[in-house]
């Protein structure tokens, strides 16, 4: 597994194996789509740096809906949690050597 798209698919399958509901898998899948839209689906996991994650956490792609309205803080926080958990999964599986999280996250 090298790309963000491959990680997203593997992570969702991992959650399915753990018994997560279809609704959870659907909403997490939407979070993965949002993350991939910012970074690009072919972004190599090893090229994701803390500065990139920090930019995503402050980006309009995360903080605003396509119509320009702000997303609810709970929605933004859930997407951040999903991304952090997905990266933690990549670390546990040996696909990255450290978590690329900014210091204040």
Image: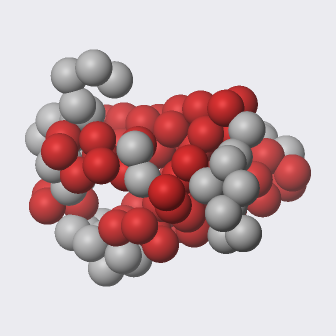
Residue extending furthest toward the top: 104
Along the line of sight, the residue nearer the viewer: 19 or 71:
71
Residue 82 location, quadrant = top right
Residue 4's spot in the image, x, y percent? 36, 66
Residue at 19 percent of width and 41 percent of height: 50
Along the line of sight, the residue nearer the viewer: 10 or 102:
102
95 vs 40, left or right, is left
Q: Quadrant of the N terminus?
A: bottom left
Residue 20 location, quadrant = top right
Residue extending furthest toward the front: 68
80 vs 52, left or right, is right
Residue 27's spot in the image, x, y percent? 75, 53
Along the line of sight, the residue nearer the viewer: 101 or 9:
101
Residue 12's spot in the image, x, y percent? 60, 56
Q: Quadrant of the C terminus?
A: top left
Along the line of sight, the residue nearer the viewer: 69 or 43:
69
Numbered circles on residues, count = 0
Residue at 14 percent of width and 61 percent of height: 47
Residue 17 higher or lower than 5, as above or below: above
Residue 69 higher or lower than 100, as above or below: below
Residue 84 higher or lower than 34, as above or below: above
> Colour scheme of this structure image?
secondary structure
Q: Does the rendering let one see residue 33? A: yes
Residue 86's spot in the image, x, y percent? 45, 45
24 vs 71, left or right, is right
Q: Does the rendering let one see residue 18? A: no
76 vs 83, left or right, is right
Residue at 23 percent of width and 52 percent of height: 52
Residue at 25 percent of width and 33 percent of height: 101
């Amino acid at each position: 597994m090298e790309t963000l798209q491959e990680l997203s698919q593997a992570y969702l399958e991992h959650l399915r194996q753990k018994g997560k509901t279809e609704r959870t898998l659907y909403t997490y899948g939407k979070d993965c789509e949002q993350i991939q839209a910012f970074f690009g689906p072919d972004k190599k996991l090893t090229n994701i740096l803390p500065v990139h994650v920090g930019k995503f956490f402050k980006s309009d792609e995360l903080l605003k809906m396509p119509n320009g309205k702000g997303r609810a803080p709970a929605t933004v926080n859930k997407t951040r949690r999903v991304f952090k958990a997905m990266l933690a999964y990549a670390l546990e599986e040996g696909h990255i050597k450290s978590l690329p999280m900014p210091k204040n996250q």
